[in-house]
Image: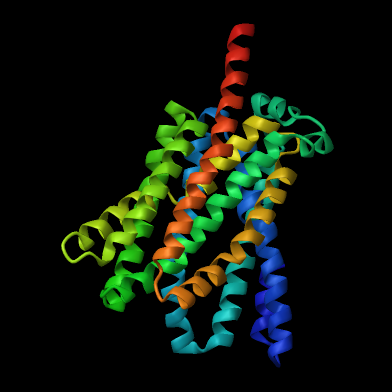
Amino acid sequence: MAALGYALAANATGVDSLVLAMAIAGIGIGFSTYVPGIVLVTRQVLPARHGLAMGILLAAISLGSVVFPPLMTAVIAAYGLRSALAGIGAGLFFPCVPFWFWVARKSAQQSPIVKEMSAVGGDIRATLLTGHYWSWVMMLMLITVSVMGVFMALIPHLVSVGYSPGQAAAFGALTGVATLVGIYVFAMVGERLGNELTLLLGTSMTAFGTLVLIGAADSKSGLGAVILFTIAWGATSSLASQLSPLLLLEIVGQRNFGGLLGLGNLIAGIASAFSPQAVGYLSDRTETYVIALQICAALLAVALIPLGHLWRLTRRKVLSRTQLR
């Protein structure tokens, strides 16, 4: 569907047909990327290596977001937008369709442990009536809205306090590098401390980095604040995407994991779609990005409440399993 959407966009005859084609591509991308990718990881990789496998998946996404925008910009400049859209469609279709058959064949060769896990989990309607699932959704939504808000405010905030657009963009790129490093580091940490505690610590670091960014305007410590933000926020801002699915898997089991993960990400995605508009509105009204950044940090602090509840829940489950053994 994504490849078809881009092919139709390359041959669009007007704005309406272009919008329709990109909508088809967007639906295809939603069906074929984050949620199904995570479900495949949890079904193909043994539980002890889930954190690292998820980290590799997200690292590939982050790397793509670094490589492809300038590459597509160069292609558009050299060959035009229609050629770039057609190239994207071909790039999706020819490598991915053969790969799909390979994945389908691999799915039929699951290990006994993974097959046993696939049967674990209660009825989806009963799960939707529990507070545990909605605590997870609330945590994911708050973190996603905050991270999106900071992401949208970063470069204009740095420009507003005196950095050049080039310098601000460079710091934005460095946060991407920190994200790649953080993905692997916190995957290892998660295997030792558990996904819940790691996400608690990481979210606290994300909130700290957001507050530090406010000090970028200080004439003496501003550069140090930006560097500290780049490390703390950059290394932890993707942890919700990396570890929250594994936390959900511990709570609900594999049986209905894909549907519940998709629903939670749909709710968080809809909420985060309003984050850029909210940041822009606040900055227009206050003529500064400080208020928006403070609110983003506060949202992360509030997210620690449902996250702490889920941590206590999973600890009780671990203790119960230990006592049974």
Question: Which quadrant does the C terminus fall into?
Answer: top right
Q: Residue furthest bottom?
A: 13
| Residue 54 higher or lower than 4, as above or below | above
Residue 145 position within the rendered picture, expressed as x and y whole percent measured from the top left: 55, 57
Q: Position of residue 204 (x, y in %)?
A: 42, 42
Q: Height in image: 124 above or below 277?
A: above
User: Which one is nearer the viewer's eye here, 221 or 229?
Assistant: 221
x and y percentages locating residue 80 in the rendered image: 52, 89
Relative to residue 110, is residue 309 drawn left or right?
left
Residue 42 appears at what percent x and percent y?
62, 37
Query: Residue at 69% across / 51% down in the picture?
Result: 101
Is residue 193 toward the left or the right of residue 139 in the image?
left
Residue 325 seen by the camera: no
Q: Write the residue at 45% across / 35% down.
A: 198
Task: State whether residue 154 appears in this view.
Answer: yes
Total label count?
Answer: 0
**In the current view of this chain or complex, which residue is farthest to the left?**
220
Direction front: furthest residue: 286
Residue beneath the point at 34% across and 49% down:
232
From the image, which quarter does the N terminus lie in?
Answer: bottom right
Q: Residue at x 33, y 75 (%)?
A: 160
* Position of 278 relative to 15 (above/below): above
- Residue 71 located left or right of residue 253: left
